[in-house]
Image (cartoon, grey):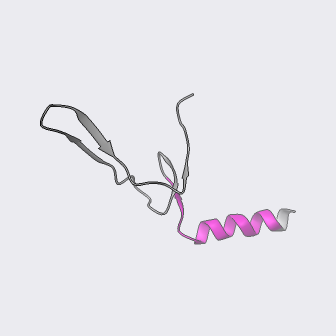
Amino acid sequence: MKKYILIIVSLLGFSGCFINERGISNRFYDDCKEYYDASGMYHKDCPSNWIDIKMTP
């Protein structure tokens, strides 16, 4: 069992997936684009993650 866990962890570590603030992705940093439109509304467009992690309860 320990052998399988070690193999899975090493595959994830060498595969290039990262845990960022929003979940597990292939990017280390969030590439969110934050902007205000002409009417003053705030928008935040983020690319999708492989696995989204909810940080709020």
Foreground residue among 48 and 9: 48
Image coordinates for residue 6, horizontal then vertical, percent: 76, 66
Residue at (31%, 42%) from the top-left corner? 44
| Most common secondary structure along the magenta stretch | helix
Would residue 2 be found to the left or right of residue 26 on screen?
right
Please say if 20 is above or below 43: below
Q: Which quarter of the figure has residue 37?
A: top left
What residue appears at the point 48 percent right and 51 percent down from the top-left corner?
20
Q: Is residue 11 above or below residue 55?
A: below
Task: Please name the residue shown 57% across and 27% down the image.
Answer: 57
Query: Residue 33: x percent and y percent?
Result: 28, 49
Q: Quadrant of the N terminus?
A: bottom right
Looking at the image, the residue that sits furthest to the left is 38
Count of numbered circles on the image: 0
Q: Nearer the viewer, residue 55 or 5?
A: 55
* Residue 30, placed above or below residue 40: below
Q: Residue 31: which quarter of the image?
A: bottom left
Task: Report the span colored magenta.
Answer: 4-19
